[in-house]
Every structure is written in structure tokens, then in C-alpha cells.
Amino acid sequence: MKIREAIKISIKQFKQANIGTYGNDAMNLLKTVLKKDEIFILTNPNYKLSDEQEKHLYTLLKKRLMLYPMAYITGKKEFYGLEFLVNEHVLIPRPETEIVVEETIKIAKTINAENIIDIGTGSGCIAITVSNILNKKVLASDISKSALYVAKLNRDRHKAKVDFILSNGIDWIRKKVDIIVSNPPYVSKKDYLNLSKDVKYEPKEALISEDGGLSFIKYLIEHSKSLTKYLILEFGYNQSPLIRSQNYLLKILKDLSGIDRVAVFKFF
């Protein structure tokens, strides 16, 4: 099979499965299988895949047709201009979380923040991006050992000044810091049932909490009061009433769809 045939077959099957990103997906499959860039693939349509490569392509094609996330197939995802390693142990970084990073950087520069903590770091995308842009040390925590393993790989990959701790919540913080940032689980069990199939391949513990994250959000706000100047928090599409009812709310930022997505609290 030649490259041109591989692309044609992949696109045809993706279209039949109503996968709207069929062109990008076909290209990414070939880049993964051949370990070549897009320029090589586009300029070498007659390049012949080996039997092993062809078999690998069909394996990945079958996975994607089952709506397995492309980021997990390629093992990477771009976030804020950086490429992060990802697998099924961490959430796939999303554009709305870049709002969290932007706001953290803005506030950190304004107050010349020296102590920043990221709660529930997952792949480490927030902590690592913030650390690299500010050239500051960031402390990040997660309840999952497997997630922290991925985060450490990303830290080393980007040579970031980030330390990690295995922990749940913020009770482990012993002294006041400048900023606490978090993208906590905020999907309810009911809403999870209605999520698209590709999202359900992602780690449940990073998506779902018992009451849709309401208790944990309240916990973060309440316990942050004595620990930090600012709390920057990503939250769910239906949690705006809760957020707006809390004291110390400084502002709410909307995502690209115009939905309330990130809250900033100022305590002292």
C-alpha cells in the first residue's frame, strides 16, 4: 500500500463513520505509523508502507473508528503552543484550560508571584506552561501516581521548574502562597452519561466527582481563603450560579463558546 492509498482508505472510512476531522485524522495516523512529518507524507504519495506499517495503520484506524481519542493514538496534544505527552491516565488538554493559564500568568506578573500551586495537575500542562512562561518554580499535585508519572515526563521534556506531590485537595499546604490554580473534576454522573464516546476514554476520576464537583469547588474556595491571595478555578457549564453565589469572587471569564468557564477569587 502506498501513502496515497492509505490516506484515501482512511478518509473514506472516517467519512462513513461520520468523523468530521477525517482529513486531519488520516494525516495524523500516517504521521504516527511512518514517524514522518506532514511535508514528507504530502510530497511522497508513492512511498510504499511496509507490511508492519500497514498492519499498524489498520490497528490505529480501527481504534479511531471506535472514537478512541486521536491524542491518545498519537500520544501527544498541543497546549498553549507546547506539545504534551498524554495517555489514558490523564485528561487531554483543552483550549478552555488555556484561559486558566492566561489568567494565572496575568495575575502572577501583576503581583510578582513567587509561590504558585496547581491542584489536580494531570498531564502537568497548566503548571509546566505557567512555569516556563514566567520562569518561576511551580508546585503541582495530583491524587494519581500514573498521572504524575506523565506530568514528570512532560516537565523533563520542557525543562520546566515544577515539583510534584502526590496528594488530594489542598490540606497539605502548610504556608501561604500567592496563587492556587485548579481544573478539578466537575462533571456530574448524570452529565457523564451524555458525554461523547471519545471523552469516556479519558480517566473518570479526572472528570467526575460525586455531586458534579460542587462540594470540591466549595471546599477549594473555603480552604483557600487562609492559604492564598488568588484562586483561579475552571468550572462546568452549569456551575455558574454556585460560583456567582460565593464571596470573594473577583471575576468570571468565558470560553470561546461564550460559556462561563473560569473563576478568579481574591482573598487578601
Image: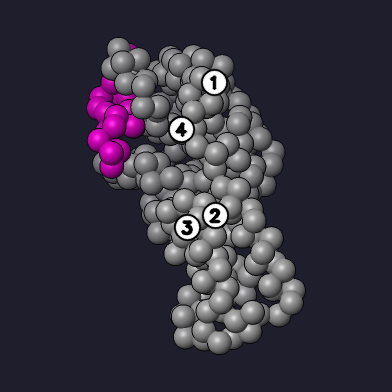
Disc 1: CA contacts within 10 A as few (<14), some (14-19) or many (>=20): some
Given residues 163 and 48, the one toward you in this image is 48
Residue 236 visible from this viewpoint: yes
Residue 45 at x, y percent in the picture: 52, 84
Amino acid type for the residue under numbered disc 1:
Lys
**Residue range highlighted in magenta:** 246-268
Q: Which residue does the numbered mark 3 point to in the structure image?
A: 15
Q: Are marks 2 and 4 in contact (CB under 8 Å)?
A: no
Point 56% across, 17% down: residue: 210
User: Quadrant location of the C terminus?
Assistant: top left
Q: Which comes sooner in the sequence, label 4 or label 3?
A: 3
Q: Which residue does the numbered mark 4 point to in the structure image?
A: 182
Q: Are marks 3 and 1 in contact (CB under 8 Å)?
A: no
Q: Which residue does the numbered mark 1 point to in the structure image?
A: 189
Q: Which residue does the numbered mark 2 point to in the structure image?
A: 70
Q: Secondary structure at mark 2?
A: helix
Which marked residue is nearer to the observer: mark 2 or mark 4?
2
State left or right for residue 43 relative to residue 61: left
State left or right for residue 83 relative to residue 146: left
